Image (cartoon, rainbow, N blue to C red):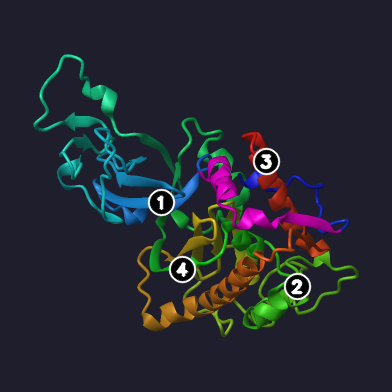
Amino acid sequence: MAAELDPGKPGMKTLDRARPTLPASWYHDSAHYTRELEAIWYRDWICVGRAEALPQPGAYTVVSIGTQSVVVTRTADDGFAAFHNTCRHRGARLCREEAGRFRNGRVICPYHTWTYALDGSLIATPGRFETDDFDAADYSLYRVHVDSWRGFVFVNLATSPAWPLAEFLGEEGAELANWPLESMRSVHQERIPLACNWKIFWENYSECYHCPRVHPELCKVMPLYKEGVFDAADLPGWQPGFEGDQGRGIVGNGAETWTLSGRRALPVIEGLTAREVADGIAFASFAAGMFVVAHPDYVRSVRVLPTGPESLELTVDWLLPAGAEPDADDIRAITELPMLVMQQDGEVCELNQRGLHCLRHEQGVLVPQEYELWRFHEYLRARLAAIGKD
């Protein structure tokens, strides 16, 4: 839950002392990974894609969350339904492909042809001998809670979600209120596997201590990042470092957006304020499954899904307003810098993962500017404690 990532002091911008990291074993122990799946990934709202990926009734996508396979489909009333990818007869997988369309609005098990409507209700059991004690209403598919926010589709595997989606997302999305996310369309997608625990990726995303060494190209566009921080409040005695510097992580030194040149390759998106255009960037983070980075000319969403104790997959979409027709040069311009940054991050995250197997490294230490990692760790500890498995 976005609001839960703030258990520290109000307004705390640095740690007041060095603090320990999570135990190293939490990043590779399979039993602990299972506990995290139960505490977070099977209880939180998880983004599974964009609504435009399901353009008509019967269109479906299959998403794996931990060990669970979930089918999400567009219904006849233009809504969404989600259910476990499991037939109620004897548990066979229903869908073999990652995406497709249910013909005639029917979900048909490939094993014994039990047939379900798009809402998951059982409507036919071909060849079954009739018995008095069988009621089709008792054998609907295992439904999964589904909801949407501004063109993004979310599911929740809990029997009774602890929060409605809007409450779970909190106020974070308000940063992107002027971007027309509902009507934007993905013009490019990358799926990136990484050999690291999902927490390592979130930790890397949550600090800029590594930026000067790892991201020299990004630091040219984002001058404050050269100081290893996101916010000048982290710097004692801070003085403006470039024209227009407001002490926040915004573009500078003549840059306009996140491209290698720093210049916009596409028109400014309609409806943005002058400050949003000048800032060149806005973030919205929804732990642990997604963050969105908005620029004056394009938006990038990054979805995170763990695939094992030491692996994850990122799904990255570049979004443009409906009707935009970018050519290959436009796509290259808006993808080059973000892809370079993600490649650089991926390399150090995988280095981090490998190093955590050291027999003597039981725990690390957080330095003052890594306060967001401390908040993330406290969030995780609280979630594990809530299910009694810390």
Q: Quadrant of the N terminus?
A: top right
- Which disc number belongs to residue 196? none
Q: Secondary structure at mark 4?
A: strand
Q: Secondary structure at mark 3?
A: loop
**Discs 2/4, front:** 4
Residue of label 3: 390
The kind of residue tagged 4 is Ile
Q: CA distance from mark 3 to mark 1?
A: 25 Å
Q: Quadrant of the C terminus?
A: top right
**Discs 3/2, front:** 3
The kind of residue tagged 1 is Ser
Query: Would you say 349 lies left or right of 335 here?
Result: right
**Discs 1/2, front:** 1
315, above or below 157, in the image: below
Q: Which residues are magenta?
A: 18-41
Q: Secondary structure at mark 1?
A: strand
Q: Earlier in the sequence, mark 1 or mark 2?
A: 1
- Which disc number belongs to residue 228? 2
Q: Earlier in the sequence, mark 3 or mark 4?
A: 4
Identity of the residue furthest to the front in this view:
359
Report if residue 126 lies within the magenta region: no
Residue ID at (28%, 23%): 138
Residue of label 1: 64
x and y, in percent, of residue 290 in the image: 53, 55
Q: CA distance from mark 3 to mark 4?
A: 30 Å
Q: Earlier in the sequence, mark 4 or mark 1?
A: 1
Residue of label 4: 192
x and y, in percent, of residue 331 in the image: 42, 77
The kind of residue tagged 2 is Gly
x and y, in percent, of residue 276 in the image: 62, 65
Residue ID at (55%, 35%): 163
Q: Quadrant of residue 80?
A: top left
